[in-house]
Amino acid sequence: METQEIKVNPFFVRCIVVEAVTVIILLLSVFIIGLFSKSYKKSLKKWYVKNILDDTKIEEVLGKDGKYEV
């Protein structure tokens, strides 16, 4: 009988591969949406600007009572 040596890939290599595949799928989906549906792209951009790029005011975090020094 021959003894075979089993090679195990490090965990971080698997994580990098999974992350790369996820990013590629995300970029491809955005590219395809941009190519085929201009109106959906505009509505998606409006949603992104409204919900993701929204600025946070300091009062939302610290409160309005003024007890904190900024």
Image: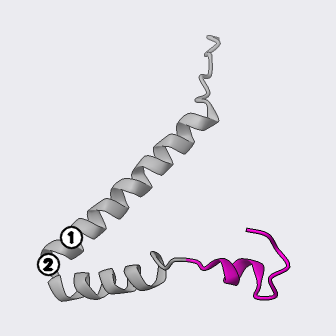
Of the pair 38 and 19, the residue shown nearer to us: 38
Q: Is residue 6 above or below residue 49?
A: above
- The tally of labels here is 2
Q: Amino acid at mark 1?
A: Ile
Q: Is residue 38 above or below residue 27?
A: below
Give the prevailing secondary structure in the magenta stretch: loop
Q: Position of residue 23 (x, y in %)?
A: 40, 55
Q: Amino acid at mark 2?
A: Phe
- Asked if the magenta segment contains residue 64, the reply would be yes
Q: Residue at x 24, y 81 (%)?
A: 41
Residue at the farthest right position:
67
Of the pair 29 and 45, the residue shown nearer to us: 45
Q: Are marks 1 and 2 in contact (CB under 8 Å)?
A: yes
Of the pair 1 and 15, the residue shown nearer to us: 15
Q: Residue at x 68, y 83 (%)?
A: 60
- Dot 1, crowdedness within 10 Å: few (<14), some or many (≥20)? few
Q: Which mark is residue 32?
A: 1
User: Which residue is labeled 2 in the image?
Assistant: 36
Secondary structure beneath dot 1 equals helix
Q: Position of residue 9 (x, y in %)?
A: 58, 29
Residues drawn in magenta: 56-70
Q: Position of residue 34 (x, y in %)?
A: 19, 73
